[in-house]
Image (cartoon, rainbow, N blue to C red):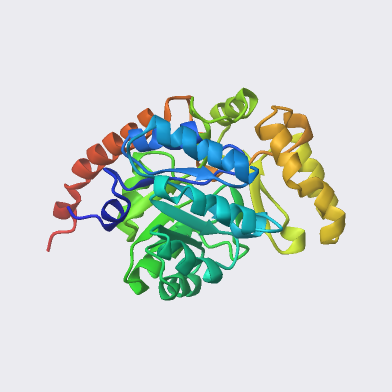
Amino acid sequence: MRNRVCEILGVKYPIIQGGLAYVGNGALAAAVSNGGGFGQVGTAGRTPENFKEQVRIAAESTDRPFGANLPISEHSDNTPYIEAILEVKDKLTAISLSAGNPKPLVSLFKEAGLKVMIMTASVKHSLKAQELGADIVICEGFEAGGHDSPLEMTLFSLIPQVSRELQIPAVAAGGIANGQGVVAALALGAEGVQLGTRFVATKECEAHENYKKFLVEAKDDATVVLERSIGRALRVLKSPFAQTILEFEKSRPTVEQLLPYIRGVNNRVAAIEGRVEEGWMNCGQSVGLIDSVESASDVVRNLAREAREIAAALGGLSTLFAD
């Protein structure tokens, strides 16, 4: 079966690792790629120098394609990060752009020889990404961990509408953690999937063990959404710190008043340093499906195996809907 995501990225399986602020490191990206998926080194929460070092680690750990993620609004000045990406472009296959206006960057990165993936959360923005020259659109549903679109579109509604309108392939992101999610996304019209939270709970990810422990122990109702009071959405693990933010948001604070609670350092102290009582941890709604910390390579292979088995089993549905 022809799959355009696999062809564009040069991978075995149409399974992409999200950029993962602070914890999307080089060893993780390489392990995902070694498993047959497409790993990414994140720039969020890193200096340009550390980003380049993580790309070097990934390149030394895999001979398979991998890429990088640039959340545009994450940095007050993207210039050093753009320069860093261009410095290491020969090691990268693709760049994913999220959280901001990608228009000034698409042609720049395509001229550098990189495939461009753009994160979207609506039909309108997906079509705009296609118009700008994106090779792949990554449609993120409201199930996803981290910053989500305030439109709050879920994948079940989003993917069929986007895939109907696009000529380029759409990838589904948000709330996917097993083979069932992979097959469901493809049935809805996606040509690939992107996972974030599941790849945090892996051996290669640099997230603190406390973070990973929370993910493994979490149930289906383990996430909450912050920042709605300022017109945004941030899905994180439930915790006393997150509850403090929710209570403060009831007072309808300004962005400036809320900023001390939601700044990146409060993510870092929990995700990297393990001081979970002092910060928040990004987490998607699929977390209840995570029950172990494995190698990221094994996660990819298991996803592919589960998807094969489920797809084969679903073959019998054709008789159920026969004329």
Q: What residue is at 39 percent from the left and 56 percent from the top? A: 171
- Residue 40 seen: yes
Vertical position of residue 274 compared to residue 86: above or below = above
Could you tell me residue 318's position as x and y percent? 16, 54
Q: Is residue 41 left or right of residue 113?
A: right
Q: Which corner quadrant of the image does residue 269 belong to?
A: top right
Q: What residue is at 28 percent from the left and 41 percent from the top? A: 307
Could you tell me residue 170's position as x and y percent? 37, 61
Q: Is residue 316 left or right of residue 183?
A: left
Q: Nearer the viewer, residue 160 or 171?
A: 171
Q: Nearer the viewer, residue 99 or 121?
A: 99
- Residue 221 seen: no
Could you tell me residue 276's position as x and y percent? 72, 30
Q: Residue furthest front?
A: 87
Q: What residue is at 35 percent from the left and 67 percent from the top? A: 163
Q: Is residue 39 left or right of residue 42?
A: left
* Image quarter of the C terminus: bottom left
Number of marks present in the image shown: 0
Q: What residue is at 63 percent from the left and 63 percent from the top? A: 150
Could you tell me residue 102's position as x and y percent? 54, 67
Vertical position of residue 78 compared to residue 284: above or below = below
Q: Nearer the viewer, residue 18 or 191?
A: 18
